[in-house]
Image: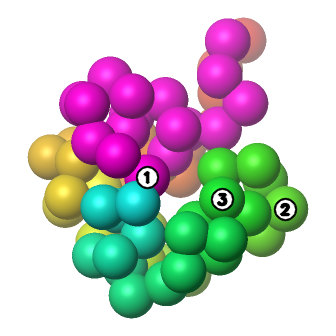
Amino acid sequence: MYRNKIAYWAEAKGVKHKALAKQCGVSIQTFSSWVNNKTQPNLIQTYIIAKALGIEMEKLVEEEKG
């Protein structure tokens, strides 16, 4: 199980974290803190990530069911 949905979808879509960080206009360190659940992207950054991954934004923000 993945710790983070951004990491899960990036791997599933074959998109590098560095490329996503660049599209969001943040450093790889900031992006890494999102992936490691230290901080969270804002809504605009979440939208950019979802668009870059070709998924709906809800897939990044919805809670796990179970």
Give above or below for 43 relative to 21.
Answer: below
Q: Is residue 29 magenta?
A: no
Q: Which mark is residue 38?
A: 2
Q: Residue at x 28, y 76 (%)?
A: 23
Tag shown at residue 34: none
**Contact? badges 3 and 2 (CB < 8 Å):** no
Q: Residue 13 in the image: x percent, y percent?
A: 24, 30
Whether residue 56 is visible, yes or no, is: no
Q: Residues within 10 Å of mark 1 (few under 14, many from 20)?
A: some
On the image, which quarter does residue 47 sit in? bottom left
**Magenta stretch in the rendered image:** 1-17
Q: Which mark is residue 32?
A: 3
- Residue at disc 3, secondary structure: helix
Q: Amino acid at mark 1?
A: His
Expressed as whole percent of the image width and height from the top left, the position of residue 3 reads: 73, 30
- Distance in Å between CA atoms under marks 2 and 1: 16 Å
In this picture, is 58 found above or below 41? above
Label whose residue precedes the other's in the sequence (3 or 2): 3
Left or right side of 9 for 65: right
Along the horizontal axis of the image, is 16 left or right of 1? Answer: left
What's under tag 3, amino acid-wise?
A: Ser
Instruction: State the residue position of label 1.
Output: 17
Relative side of 56 to 43, left or right: left
Q: Are marks 1 and 3 in contact (CB under 8 Å)?
A: yes
SS category of the residue bearing label 2: loop
The quadrant of the rendering that contains the C terminus is top right
